[in-house]
Image (spheres, helix red, strand yellow):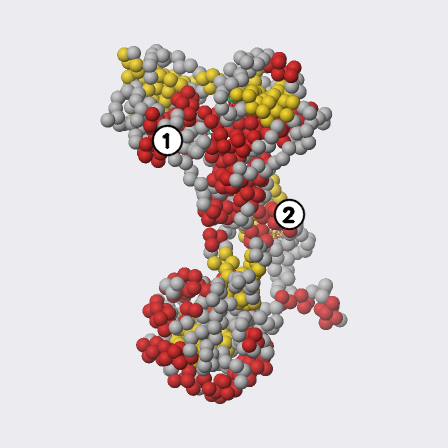
Amino acid sequence: MADLTTNFVGIESPNPFWLASAPPTDKEYNVRRAFEAGWGGVVWKTLGSEGPPVVNVNGPRYGVVYGADRRVLGLNNIELITDRPLEVNLEEMARVKADFPDRALIASIMVPCEEAAWKAILPRVAETGADGIELNFGCPHGMSERGMGSAVGQVPEYIEMVTRWCKTYYDKPVIVKLTPNITDIRKPAAAARNGGADAVSLINTINSITSVDLDRMCPEPTIDGKGSHGGYCGPAVKPIALSMVSEIARAEATRGLPISGIGGVTTWRDAAEYMALGCGNVQVCTAAMTYGFRIVEEMKRGLSAWMDEKGYARTSDFVGMAVPNVTDWQYLNLNYVTKARIDPEACIQCGRCYAACEDTSHQAIAMKPGRVFEVIDAECVACNLCVDVCPVENCISMVELAPGETDPRTGKVVEEAYANWTQHPNNPMAVKAAE
Amino acid sequence: MTDTLTPGIVAGRLSAKEIAANFADLHAPLDPHEAAVAADRCYFCYDAPCVTACPTDIDIPLFIRQIATGQAEAAGHTIFEQNILGGMCARVCPTEDLCEGACVREMAEGKPVEIGRLQRYATDAVMARQDHPFSRAAATGKRIAVVGAGPAGLSCAHGLARRGHDVVVYEAKAKPGGLNEFGIAAYKSTDDFAQAEVAWLMQIGGIEMRHGCALGRDVALAELEADYDAVFLGIGLGDVNALDVAGATREGVGDAVGFIADLRQAADLTALPVGRNVVVIGGGMTAIDAAVQSKLLGAETVTVAYRRGQDRMGASRYEQDLATSKGVRILCNVSPVAIHGNGAAVEIELEYTREAGTDLTGTGETIRLPADQVFRAIGQTLAPPDGIARAGTKLSVSGPGRTTRDKVWAGGDCTPGDDLTVVAVAEGRDAAADIHAVLMGDAG
Ligand SMILES: Cc1cc2nc3c(=O)[nH]c(=O)nc-3n(C[C@H](O)[C@H](O)[C@H](O)COP(=O)(O)OP(=O)(O)OC[C@H]3O[C@@H](n4cnc5c(N)ncnc54)[C@H](O)[C@@H]3O)c2cc1C
Ligand SMILES: Cc1cc2nc3c(=O)[nH]c(=O)nc-3n(C[C@H](O)[C@H](O)[C@H](O)COP(=O)(O)O)c2cc1C
Ligand code: SF4
Ligand code: SF4
Ligand code: SF4
């Protein structure tokens, strides 16, 4: 059996599945249930400064995007940070940590961008025995209007500054949680590193309006006829988050910076993918909110079974393994030529590949009498669209042309050597280099 | 007390409650969530095989997508554009042989998209409000006589009225609907759907219904030809084939179509008599329907006796399975030789048969089954009107229902082709288009 124990920036947890700072980690009651269900760690719902807590709206705070059969694909929320007093949260955190010493307990914090505010809260958090802190620079709604959350996360200088304060006034690991509502994710990550952060976690939620009520003409969720953008999360955001994670994992300025992967983790496979792209662990919110805490059992068993199958003894054996294979477009091998192949045995004759290729791709599929569908190699550019739209898995595959074969589309013989755009004759820069 | 074991042909074998449960909707309507899930399974195929398989060419992927996007009524309109009796067809079509049989998901996993039930969902949505999706074109001044208010006649009448013609429907019976009203199994068309559908269809306007008016009895074809610009015959198959065996006239022997018509018209099914031991001769849809409904009325044993192998039965596999699931026994390769009794039928004697190609020979071995009621379901035949050439047992037509007489068109069961509601609708529709084209002078 694979060993799921992880050590993330010095914080031990029995497995890499943490609950992200959000409603599942809002208070002692939830967190105890989560630990009893087997979660490796929690990032407590974001704490604010001492004094009267923030208030939430009293109408719907979630909106959702469904797939088939009301499967939750995306969730949007306009919830703020904790609306419970700081002292209550701190007392609860201390109690839970004492009872579950083997689990990771991280305090998420969002206080005004002033040194005094951070200096005030950090010692109090330290007293709870929490294993570390996460700086919430992500929340894209409400808090950002008050100059916190993503308003800070969008300014790398602020990130660096606040991180430095935290490293000054707190001696355990500091994780900086990044907002995806920014053009280049490498900038805030580098700022966090420069400020001394032990790790970054990403992503927080993405600005979103999930839907519009066409009768009342207002965005949803709707509060008394008005709506405000919220933060989007759940399976729909995973591709965006994975790309951001990979950017940080491979950029010169941030390479090697530990990452806690967040965004749409719903199954063991999602977690494995984040980890392959360089995350030391993952955090989960929407999946727990959709299915309850018990899903962690599937995640643990699934990851463990897959690791056994692959021969990975511990998570660190495969963390980051996919990073070297993430590259820029310009370095992709242009001498790699494939053609779509339809397996007539598997084909159920729906014609979707035909419609897709005929209407929107390269007219490379022939529809023959008897609903027989065949790829025309002389037209196929290997875009993969037919594979993607075919309802039958593995019915259409991409077959590589071996070096020496002629590509009937271009009439060129496939070369063995790797060649990319930087060397291509059509590239004006390449021609210059050759001269 | 009367129950399933009471000998003879008696009423009240089951309680009103049991009868109500037995004759409830065979396929309960989908609720909105079920419809969304079912609709989501459609792949929106290119040149979809289900459409090809639908005799009325309903744009199935389109209407299913409309359901999926939350517009059931718009989906209903898409259906009605092609098939004005889409509501009835959703209930009675042997979809396993038509659209669903051709669905790629049938090929993929043996579980087609539930096209029939989705069609019902969409058409019900429109009809729930009795909303009629079409309006009439400007009046053309042309008048057309439609004979028969079955699916073929109704479809033709609507198509003509919609194009601005005035239509008079001559219907022999006191009620419209044809076999929708008198033939279709009760559990397929519940809540008096056939009549509701006709009322809804008539909202187009321009259709006058003359009940109790039979061609050949109350009005002659020549009269219609003289009085109208065109005539459409949708008279179905009026006669049933006779059973030529000893004892065929004994009390208790009857024809299945008549039994079903009585059943469909009965105000109270507990008052409808049925035998204790029922044997139905035949292998088509009518045989199955008579057998199943006998069983549902409370007969103790019901046997369908078919003279050839099961694979040759006219009833679809689905219908056969439905029958056996209700407790009907299907006995194949047996042919009736005599009905024994003493006045009334008591037993039926059947001889085993052997098939060699299309030849059928008796083996000489016979069995006897108790039978106090025997139904003939060995086919219906045309009661042909005078003066129209026939092709075999049906009216001869070319193209979209043109008979050998200039002004006379025909469609539905009285013309060649499958005897199905949906085929009748298609033929009535196409004849209407052709009549219109001819009358308005742009026919090819
Ligand atoms: C028991 C039974 C069950 C069936 N079940 C199914 C099923 O589940 N699914 C399916 O698709 N099909 C089924 N069918 C077949 C289907 O009912 C017919 O194919 C369809 O009704 C044919 O329509 P039609 O308009 O041609 O004829 P009909 O429905 O027979 O209508 C003909 C109409 O013309 C009238 N008429 C006849 N002669 C005259 C005259 N001389 N003058 C005036 N009016 C006249 C009749 O009274 C009747 O109203 C079944 C048939 C039977 C008998
Ligand atoms: C209702 C809700 C409230 C959240 N509140 C916080 C918060 O207080 N602090 C924080 O850092 N992130 C918060 N998040 C963001 C999540 O921690 C997480 O980053 C995001 O949901 C992406 O993960 P997921 O796709 O697994 O849900 C919240 C998310 C949701 C849905
Ligand atoms: S890979 Fe692209 S171009 Fe080739 S057949 Fe498929 S859809 Fe057409
Ligand atoms: S999409 Fe797939 S299943 Fe459908 S016709 Fe093309 S190859 Fe066959
Ligand atoms: S064949 Fe089936 S999946 Fe394809 S369009 Fe028709 S109903 Fe949809």
Residue A26 horizontal/vertical position (percent) = 41, 72
The reply to whether the C-beta atoms of the residues labelled 2 and 1 are less than 8 Å apart is: no
Say which quadrant the C terminus of chain B sits in.
Answer: top right
Question: Residue sitting at 52 percent across and 21 percent down?
Answer: B211
Marker disc for residue A403: none
Residue A307: x and y in percent read 41, 66
Same-chain status of marks 2 and 1: no
Q: Nearer the viewer, residue A419 or B78?
A: B78
Q: Is residue B27 visible?
A: yes
Image quarter of the N terminus of chain B: top left
Image coordinates of residue B24 in percent, x first then y, are 39, 35
| Dot label at residue A358 | 2
Q: Is residue B25 above or below residue A96?
A: above
Circle nearer the viewer, 2 or 1: 1
Q: Quadrant of residue A368?
A: top right
Mark-to-mark CA distance, 2 and 1 = 46 Å
What amino acid type is highlighted by mark number 1?
Ala
Q: Residue B135 sits in which quadrant?
A: top right
Instruction: Specify the amino acid type for callout 2.
Output: Glu
Q: Residues within 10 Å of mark 2 (few under 14, many from 20)?
A: some
Give A207 or A369, whichever is nearer the viewer.
A207
For disc 1, the chain is: B
Q: Is residue B319 left or right of residue B127?
A: left
- The x, y position of residue A142, in whole percent, is 53, 72
Q: From the viewer's perspective, is residue A310 above or below residue A104?
A: above
Residue occupying image coordinates x 53% and y 12%:
B217
The answer for which chain carries disc 2 is A
Mark 1 residue element: helix
Residue at image location 49% in from the left, 72% down from the top: A80
Decide: few, some or many residues near mark 1? Use Cα within 10 Å; few <14, some 14-19, many ≥20: many
The residue identified by callout 1 is B323
Residue at horizontal 57 percent and vertical 60 percent from the top: A218
